[in-house]
Amino acid sequence: MPALEGVEHRYVELGDGVTIHVANAGPADGPAVMLVHDPKDGTRVDVPVRWLCGTKDPVLTPDLLDGYADRISDFEVELVDGVGHWIVEQRPELVLDRLRSFLKAET
């Protein structure tokens, strides 16, 4: 994954295709933690997964998702036009809306 200037990235391999990715842009932002599962290793994910990504994100591009839908039982992708890597900062209302909808549907 390409590094963004000023952002520290750490990765911890947990095994079974699961990695913890921590990106820390500094004390103002605090760390962003993401569990990353690579279903290309043959394992399956049987929990709902929603992927929200900006069309102008130079790091998390749609081609990274190739093969995920075949290995995840409930997988949806939404590409947001004109948004870059920092989708939470650029479109906070949209992210919050999608998160609320997802959590409401799962309860």
Image: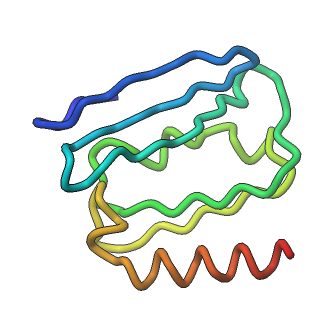
Instruction: Give me the residue at 72% from left, 31% from top.
Output: 39
Q: Closer to the camera, 66 or 89?
A: 89
Q: Against 1, is 6 above or below? A: below
Q: Tell which residue pokes out farthest to the front in this image.
A: 27
Please state if 11 lies on the left or on the right of 87 as rendered: right
- Image quadrant occupied by the N terminus: top left
Residue 69 point in image, percent of width and height: 74, 47
Residue 92 point in image, percent of width and height: 37, 77
Please state if 26 lies on the left or on the right of 86 as rendered: left
How many callouts does the rendering have? 0
Instruction: Give me the residue at 72% from left, 74% from top.
Output: 103
Which quarter of the picture shows residue 29? bottom left
Q: Tell which residue pokes out farthest to the left in this image.
A: 5
Q: Closer to the camera, 107 or 98?
A: 107
Q: Against 80, is 5 above or below? A: above
- Colour mode of the rendering: rainbow
Please state if 91 lies on the left or on the right of 41 as rendered: left
Which quarter of the picture shows residue 40? top right
Residue 14 point in image, percent of width and height: 65, 18
Please state if 55 lies on the left or on the right of 99 as rendered: left
Q: Against 46, is 13 above or below? A: above
Q: Closer to the camera, 58 or 23?
A: 23
- Image quadrant occupied by the C terminus: bottom right
Instruction: Give me the residue at 35% from left, 65% from top.
Output: 87
Residue 101 point in image, percent of width and height: 68, 82
